[in-house]
Amino acid sequence: MKKIFGRTPSLTDAPTHYCGGCGHGIVHRVLCEVIDELGLRESTVGIAPVGCAVLGYDYWNFDVSEAAHGRTPAVATGMKRARPDLTVFSYQGDGDLAAIGTAEIIHAANRGERITVIFVNNTVYGMTGGQMAPTTLVGQKTLTSPHGRKFEEFGEPIRVVELLSQFRGTAYAARTSVHNPVEVIKTKKAIKKAFQAQVDGIGFSIVEILSQCPTYWGMTPVQSVEYVRDELVKYFPLGTFKDETGAKASAV
Amino acid sequence: MTTQKVLMCGNEVLAEAAVRAGCRCYFGYPITPQNEISAYMSKRMPEIGGVFIQAESELAAINMVFGASAVGVRAMTSSSSPGVSLKQEGISYIAGAELPAVIVNVMRGGPGLGNIGPAQSDYFQAVKGGGHGDYHQIVLAPYSAQEVSDITFLSFDLADQYRMPVMILTDGVIGQMMEPAVIEKKEVRNLLPKDWALTGCRGRKPNVVKSLYLGDKVLERHNLKLQERYRQVAAHEVRYDAYHLDDAELIVVAYGICARLCKSAMNDLRAKGMRIGMIRPVTLWPFPSRIISQVAGTGKSFLTVEMSFGQMVEDVRLAVNGKSGVHFYGRGGGEMLTREEVLKEMERLYAQLRGGKNV
């Protein structure tokens, strides 16, 4: 019998702790496929964040570090500068990247650190029980915005890739989603470009991935992907905000 | 600059010694009175193919150290008191993740923004664990430019050997004062290869660097392992200088720049026939408790001198354990003690002691 499909080597066979319908598993899968397709597994160091993905090292079959909440881009900077031959990515959630780690992500991008950031935006703090995040939509109910987020009190959700794409140091910035198979394929393509930007040494790369959190959105998995499709993408448009991979790669 | 004597300020001696000790990554953030270190590193690191980053904050700097160390490269950060407070989170993570790291604190007056005068008021933070969790860092306190150099070489080896953070605790005077020093490695340690480092999993199973330990008793086991390591450090790495303990009736305990003043005052008073001795802790953690405990007893009194309002004196009292009187003299808030006032206090206390008063 011919085997035509199997687990990509960068993914372990451990069952994940993620809730039913959660997007993290999908992101892990395409991330690991990209790493294997680019032949980077044995030179990769991943950084798991404080958040739902903290146990990344159980699921990723390559070297992994943890980092303090929000400090992941600083840890990645230290790694990549110390060992430029390694492929370094940070995997971060919305609270980690856009609240407590705002300074670290902005300066890592501005310095053009040759790292790749996988930013999973599901608009809530999952690990701590579903609190409001910097990316929670106005009106969205969470554990700490029981009447819906109000702009007057907590401002608007931060559009991270739009912000980071303004820096000269940023080589690639895109927003994708994992709410249907087409978007999953686009997500994989974006992650591949982001890693290619690092391999080519042209600058900082980030892919923001809109992801569903049925548990803390109080929805079924089906309702949650519909919420991404109908609500999240309205405020967080999908697309490529910066792409210098072609230009600089051909110039080299 | 090979092994000849150089005339440099303590901070620059520290930076050059770090480079010669194999430090290849330096991450800092501006704060007085340690700016000479980052300025020196910004010039020196590119010369040797090393890394210099002026980070966006002390938080970022210590986490860059975490990253560089995790991939197996010797890394250092330096700051002064308020900045070192910011690094405490990172130091706790470094301790939890069993990473080597060298952190320099050129202490200044506090609390809060304080001032930029020299101080020793971060002793508690340094030796009692300024961050969260049951951990220790090795704390070394040089008292001259030469010792700054020696301790810097030693710090990188200790950090690698025990896979834990090492703090060089110095102050504005030691950092700014220019003195001759020979910057060379004096001790050789056999260090194990860093097979735990994240260097890419080619030909081996993946490595993980982490401080999260979930599950029944898992974190306790991790802590017990750390505690055993701390016992090893305490058993093998205590360093101190002792002077005239055989005949001393008054034993001064002081570290860093204070020890320099006290030693000079002690020598003057001994020339006048006063039986004064001194213990100068070089490691503040592990603390030289055993020698203090051994010499404590009838006919001996202790005087702890610090540029703080009394921090190390608590460890002296613990070591003395009621067997002798323990006195304290200090100033704080970034004010420098003078040799004369230390001498006067030693003389006064000695006279009081000889007068048969119960001290």
Image (cartoon, coloured by chain):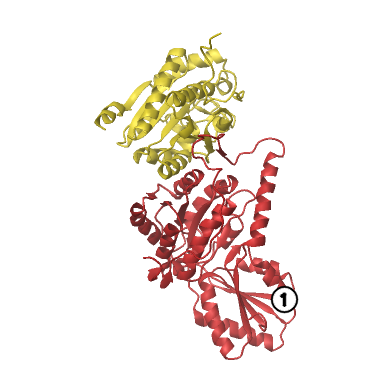
Chain colours: A yellow, B red
Disc 1 crowd rating (10 Å Cα; few below 14, some 14-19, many 20+) is some
Q: Does A57 appear above or below B292? A: above
* Rendering coords of residue B316 (x, y %): 66, 69
Horizontal side of B341 relative to B351 (left or right) equals left
* Rendering coords of residue B218 (x, y %): 69, 39
**In which chain is the residue bearing label 1?**
B
Horizontal side of B100 relative to B287 (left or right) equals left
Residue under the image location 48 percent in, 45 percent down: B63
* Rendering coords of residue B253 (x, y %): 61, 74
Residue highlighted by disc 1: B324
Q: Nearer the viewer, residue B160 or B222?
A: B160
Q: Nearer the viewer, residue B149 or B185?
A: B185
Residue under the image location 29 percent in, 36 percent down: A168
Horizontal side of A103 relative to B320 (left or right) equals left
Q: Nearer the viewer, residue B39 or B110?
A: B39
Quadrant assignment for the C terminus of chain A = top left
- Total marks shown come to 1
Can residue B165 be seen in this snapshot?
no
Residue type (three-letter) at the residue carrying disc 1: Ser
Q: Secondary structure at mark 1?
A: loop
